[in-house]
Image (spheres, coloured by chain):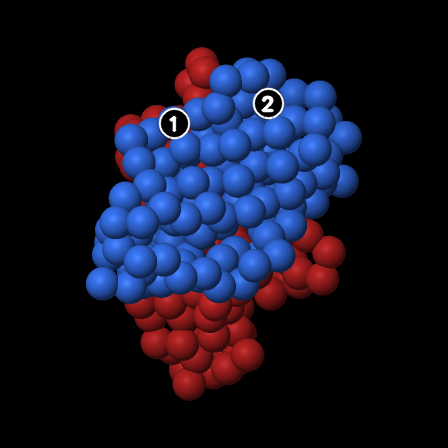
Chain colours: A blue, B red
Amino acid sequence: AQTVTQSQPEMSVQEAETVTLSCTYDTSESDYYLFWYKQPPSRQMILVIRQEAYKQQNATENRFSVNFQKAAKSFSLKISDSQLGDAAMYFCALTGANSKLTFGKGITLSVRP
Amino acid sequence: GAVVSQHPSRVICKSGTSVKIECRSLDFQATTMFWYRQFPKQSLMLMATSNEGSKATYEQGVEKDKFLINHASLTLSTLTVTSAHPEDSSFYICSARAFLPGMNTEAFFGQGTRLTVV
C-alpha cells in the first residue's frame, strides 16, 4: 500500500514571495514516481512537476522546484516569485511503475496581491 | 503534453435516469484509464481502473452495478451512472496513462464532468 500525506490544508503567500508546500509519503515499491498537480478553480488537473525516485537531482520547472528527501520520504514543492495565477489547490501524488496514482488531501494556496 | 478529452463538462439529469460520461485520449493510446470522484475542496477519490478489453477493477465501496465502466478501445473509456440519485451529484474526472516509452507512468487528466442529479 502507498500513502501520501499533506498535513497543511491551507497556506497563503504574498505575491512575488516564495512558498513551500509539504508532502510526505510511504511506499513499499523501490521504483516510484512523485508528482505535484495544480487544480485551479476550473478544476482541470495540471501537472506542475515530476520526480523519478531513482534520480538524486531535484526536479525544477521554471519557478517550481522540489526538495526530494528519499530517506525521509519527503517531497516538498517550492514556488518562487509567487504569482496571482498560482492560487489553486495543489495535490502531491505518488505512483509505482504499474500501480495507481495515490493523492494527498491537497492544500489550498492563496496569493495575496 | 498528451490530451485527454472528457465529455460532457456539465450535465443535469433527473433522478432515476442514467448518464454516460466519455473519456478520450486524443493523441496517444491509453493502456489504462482511471475514474475519480471529487467532492468540493477534497482530494480525488479513485473509483475504478479500466484496462482496454477487460473488466474494470473497482475500489472498495464503489458499486460496480451503479457505475458501469467500459473501455472498448485504447482511446475511449466511458462511465455510466445508472439510476442516478441526488447523492451521486459530484465532480467526476478521468485520467489516462500514456502507452509511450518513458511516459507510461504519467497520467493525463480530462477536464472533468460536473454531474447534478435533480
* Residue pictured at 22% horizontal, 63% vertical: A113
The three-letter amino acid code for the residue at tag 1 is Thr
Given the current orientation, which residue lies at the most extreme bottom position?
B118
Residue A22: x percent and y percent?
A: 55, 47
User: Vertical placement of B44 versus B15: above or below?
Assistant: above
Q: How many dots with numbers? A: 2
Chain label for disc 1: A
Q: What is the crowding at mark 2: few (fewer than 14 residues within 10 Å), some, or many (at least 20)? A: some
Q: Measuring 43% from the left and 79% from the top, which residue is drawn there? A: B117
> Foreground: A50 or B32?
A50
Residue B63, label in figure = none
Q: In terms of image quadrants, where is residue B2? A: top left
Q: Secondary structure at mark 1?
A: strand
Report which quarter residue B74 is drawn in: top left
Which residue is at a point 46% across and 46% down the rendered structure image? A20
Residue A93 in view (yes/no): yes
Where is mark 1, residue-wise? A60
Q: Are marks 1 and 2 on the same chain?
A: yes
Give the alpha-carbon distance from disc 1 to disc 2, as whole Å.
14 Å
Front in this rendered view, residue A6 or B37: A6
Residue placed most toward the observer, A58 or B113: A58
Say which of B27 and A11 sits in front.
A11
Q: Residue B57: horizontal and vertical position, in percent?
A: 66, 45
Please give the residue where the numbered disc 2 appears in the rendered image. A53
Amino acid found under the numbered disc labelled 2: Ala
Pinpoint the chain carrying mark 2. Answer: A
Q: Is residue B78 left or right of residue A88?
A: right
Q: Secondary structure at mark 2?
A: loop
Whether tag 1 and tag 2 are in contact, CB under 8 A, the answer is no
